[in-house]
Amino acid sequence: MKRQKLNYRFHNPNTAEVTADYILKVFIEANMKKVERAMQEAANKSAEEDKQSEK
């Protein structure tokens, strides 16, 4: 039996800029934990380097 190919179409009444902004917000929200972890690690590394340079 031959499988039917699925076609998806999305109707987007927004401008490209509004759509890009929305997608960016979704990605930021989805990756918030990773961003917070990376910022914390960078802050810890900076603090350790400052301590070592003071000695």
Image: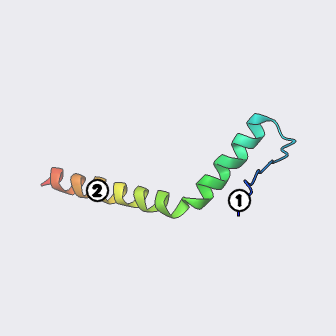
Q: Position of residue 4 (x, y in %)?
A: 74, 57
Distance from Cα at disc 2 to Cα at disc 1:
58 Å
Q: Is residue 50 left or right of residue 43?
A: left
Screen quadrant of the C terminus: bottom left
Looking at this rendering, what residue extends furthest in the right direction? 13
Which residue is at the far left?
55
The percent coordinates of residue 14 (x first, y second) are 84, 40
Query: Residue 52 occupies which quadrant of the picture?
Result: bottom left
Q: Nearer the viewer, residue 25 or 8?
A: 8
Report the quarter where the N terminus lies: bottom right
- The three-letter code of the residue at mark 1 reads Lys
Mark 2 / mark 1, whichever is N-terminal: 1
Quarter-wise, where is residue 38 in the image?
bottom left
Q: Quadrant of residue 45?
A: bottom left
Q: Amino acid at mark 2?
A: Lys
Callout 2: helix, strand or loop? helix
> Going by the image, does 52 lie left or right of 1?
left
| Viewer-closest of 12 and 34 | 12
Q: Which mark is residue 30?
A: none
Question: Can you identify the residue that label 1 sits on?
Answer: 2
Q: Which percent across, then down, holds residue 19?
A: 75, 42
Q: Which residue is mark 2?
A: 45
| 29 over 9 or under it: above or below | below
Residue at image coords 48%, 57%? 35
The secondary element bearing badge 1 is classed as loop
Classify mark 1: residues with Cα within 10 Å, few (<14), some (14-19) or many (20+): few
Q: Where in the figure is residue 46, as x and y percent of width and height?
A: 29, 53
Give the residue displayed 66% in from the left and 51% down from the top: 25
